[in-house]
Amino acid sequence: MLLANSEGVSTAASDLFKLGPLSVSNSILTTWLVAAVIILVIQVVVGTPKLIPNKGQAIIEGLAQGLRDALEPVVGKAMIGRVFPVLCGFFVFILLMNWSGLLPGVGTLKYQVGATQWEDFLRPANSDLNTTLALSVVSFVAWTYFVLRYAGIKTLAYDLFGNKSDKRETHIVMWILLSFIFLGVGCIEVVSILFRLISLSFRLYGNVYGGESLVHSLSAVAKWGVPAAAGLLEVLVGLIQAFVFTLLSAIYIGLICNHDGGHADDEHAQ
């Protein structure tokens, strides 16, 4: 039995059905539906890409170029061609999943699972911690691949633990002491890198879940003006959070690859 109400999203995703060994939750179902809509819209608007683009293709290419121009100074010209598909995928997926909570029925359409218990039939994907944690894992794996592939383990080790002082201008005793300091700082940096899995996932989850809860709570108080204003605010928050996640992922890659220590050459840039 389905029921529409304004109680808002629950704190955890709930399983709807199984596909073999795979449990399909309400957040996964929302992801699939939104992905299907994206594919359909792109096919209708763009169709087969052409050398002379139509209006739809020109708009999509213009938006992609704008995002690329914003990220290029962060990761560098030598790396932007390699990392942009991943970063663009992050931005588009996160943005549309953030905005999916504003669609009618998402977070408000409930189904009954017990005498008094109701669960969300559709749930914003990024209000599920499993989704945001998976995005963080993908970002971490991408960072590891690009850094090791295009900067190298030697550059990474030096960037984390190497003594950056000039040995020719530093007394040998001071240089040795600084080496221990840089080693300690490197250990802290390793912890910071591992902590990115938590910071990226919880930042996105907290903002999206908090916004969804706010919109649905206000819907129970007032039916029109206040929820509409909160919904417009969530459009902006969803855009900012998508860009923040993408930008941080780009910064993490650029910190290692976008300097002289890396060996990503401009001639290989795409």
Image: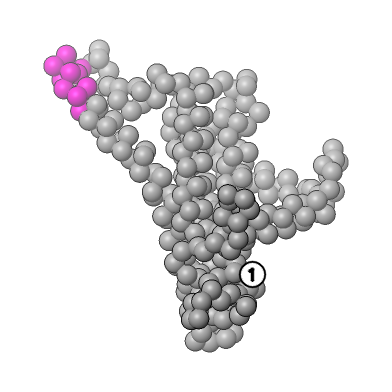
Which of the 4 quarters of the picture holds residue 113? bottom right
Foreground of the two, 223 or 76: 223
Other-residue count near label 1 (Cα within 10 Å), few / some / many at <14 / 14–19 / ≥20: few
Foreground of the two, 196 or 19: 19
Q: Residue furthest left?
A: 173
Mark 1: which secondary structure? loop
Q: What type of secondary structure mainly makes up the magenta span? A: helix
Image position, residue 71 (x, y; %): 56, 41
Residue 27 visible in rendering: no
Residue 167 visible in rendering: yes
Which stretch did the figure color magenta? 170-181
| Residue at 20% from the left image edge and 28% from the top image edge | 181
| Residue at 50% from the left image edge and 41% from the top image edge | 139
Which of the 4 quarters of the picture holds residue 35? bottom right
Q: What amino acid type is highlighted by mark number 1?
A: Leu
| Residue at 32% from the left image edge and 34% from the top image edge | 190
* Residue 160 vertical placement versus 244 (above, below): above
